[in-house]
Image (cartoon, grey):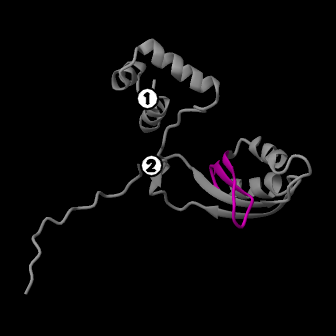
Amino acid sequence: MDTNKLLQLLVNDPRATVTDLADVLGEKETDVEAAKNGLEKDKIICGYHTVINWDKTNIEHVDAVIAVSAKPERNTGYDKIAQRIAKFPEVSSLYLMSGGSEFLVNVNAKTMREVADFVGEKLAPVEGVSQTTTMFILKKYKVNGVAMDLEPEVEDDRMPVSA
């Protein structure tokens, strides 16, 4: 079975049924199910997520991106600091980065005040964290490959005219 093709199909449509996946892959449903379960067990597939346009709901929702500077610890580098940061439920994503900061942290909350409290009371005091820079997301145009609320570009089908 082409595992890469299976993964790409699931990236494009996480709700695809095993039957549909088997049809596209030309495999037996039982084989696809076993492959999918194996990928989940091996933590290659780590979850299935829904992209929500919170601007179209009446639910308060704020997303922030926080650049975090930190000093690596002896023997564990950045891993222990990352474990401390990742345990907070406000943290939706955490990445070790190259560039000006060591970590990039995505945070979800109801209000900007909640994000500010999280940074001041929980994130900044984490041992090893030396600096934070918080940026609030004002509008999302595309998330995980999905265009949010962009108007489709109208194609100009007029013929060019020269003088």
Report whether 56 appears left or right of 60: left
Q: Residue at x 64, y 26 (%)?
A: 42
Q: Picture coordinates of residue 66 (x, y %)?
A: 69, 59
| Residue wearing tag 1 | 15
The residue most toward the bottom is 163
Label 2 – label 1 distance at C-alpha: 16 Å
| Residue wearing tag 2 | 145
Q: Amino acid at mark 1?
A: Arg
Q: Residue at x 77, y 40 (%)?
A: 87
Q: Main secondary structure of the magenta part?
A: strand
Q: Amino acid at mark 2?
A: Gly
Q: Is residue 35 above or below residue 112?
A: above
Q: Is residue 105 magenta?
A: yes
Q: Residue at x 45, y 54 (%)?
A: 142
Which residues are the magenta region? 92-111
Which quarter of the figure has residue 5?
A: top left
Q: Picture coordinates of residue 8 (x, y %)?
A: 45, 36
State the SS at label 2.
loop
The residue most toward the top is 30
Q: Name the foreground residue: 24 vs 106.
A: 24
State the SS at label 1.
loop
Q: Picture coordinates of residue 97 (x, y %)?
A: 69, 57
